[in-house]
Image: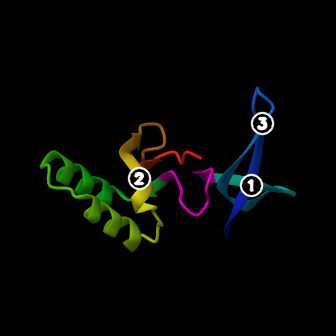
Amino acid sequence: MTYIRKIKRKNKDGTIKTYYAEVESVREGDKVVQRYIRSLGTDPEHPTNIPIEPTHFSYLSLRLMQDSLTPNDLFEMLENMGQPVKKEDLKRLGIHYDFEKKTYSISLSYRKNSK
């Protein structure tokens, strides 16, 4: 079973930033350790890195090359995968392939909220 872990990091200027990661507990010998699954960024409700299946990757790649992928298509696909996305704040997305792990993922960049 996975759960969300809160990680606090202190910046050089002294401010503390909170990050979240999805982890799971696994037993290695006599110890229980946390195995990192993925980063959720600074907002666990709206992750910045979403793992996807190879079939979704090929679908997105093909639609991007044909210049026929609309934002609504992407949002619908992510919602069907159970991934929440802040549509109004989304700035850009990237489709990535990790050669070492042989995994596919989507990275989402959100607009910064100015105060």
Residue 47 covered by magenta stretch: yes
Mark 3, Cα crowd under 10 Å, few <14 / some 14-19 / many 20+, is: few
CB atoms of marks 2 and 3 within 8 Å: no
* Residue type indicated by callout 2: Leu
Residue 45: name its quadrant. Answer: bottom right
11 or 113, nearer to the observer: 113
* Residue type indicated by callout 3: Thr
Of the two numbered discs 2 and 1 on the same chain, state the one appearing first in sequence: 1
* Residue type indicated by callout 1: Lys
Q: Nearer the viewer, mark 2 or mark 1?
A: 2
Q: Which residues are magenta?
A: 37-49
The answer for how far apart the CA atoms under marks 3 and 1 are is: 16 Å
Residue at 44% over, 49% down: 108
* Image quadrant where one finds the N terminus: bottom right
Residue 69 in view (yes/no) = yes
Q: Dot 2 corresponds to which residue?
A: 90
- Secondary structure at badge 3 equals loop
* Residue 9 placement (x, y as % from top left): 76, 39
* Residue 76 placement (x, y as % from top left): 32, 69
Residue at 22% over, 58% down: 70
Residue 15 numbered mark, or none:
3
Of the two numbered discs 2 and 3 on the same chain, state the one appearing first in sequence: 3
* Total numbered labels: 3
Q: Is residue 99 above or below residue 27?
A: above
Residue at 23% over, 57% down: 59
21 or 71, nearer to the observer: 71
* Residue 19 placement (x, y as % from top left): 68, 48
The answer for how far apart the CA atoms under marks 2 and 3 are is: 26 Å
Q: Dot 1 corresponds to which residue?
A: 6
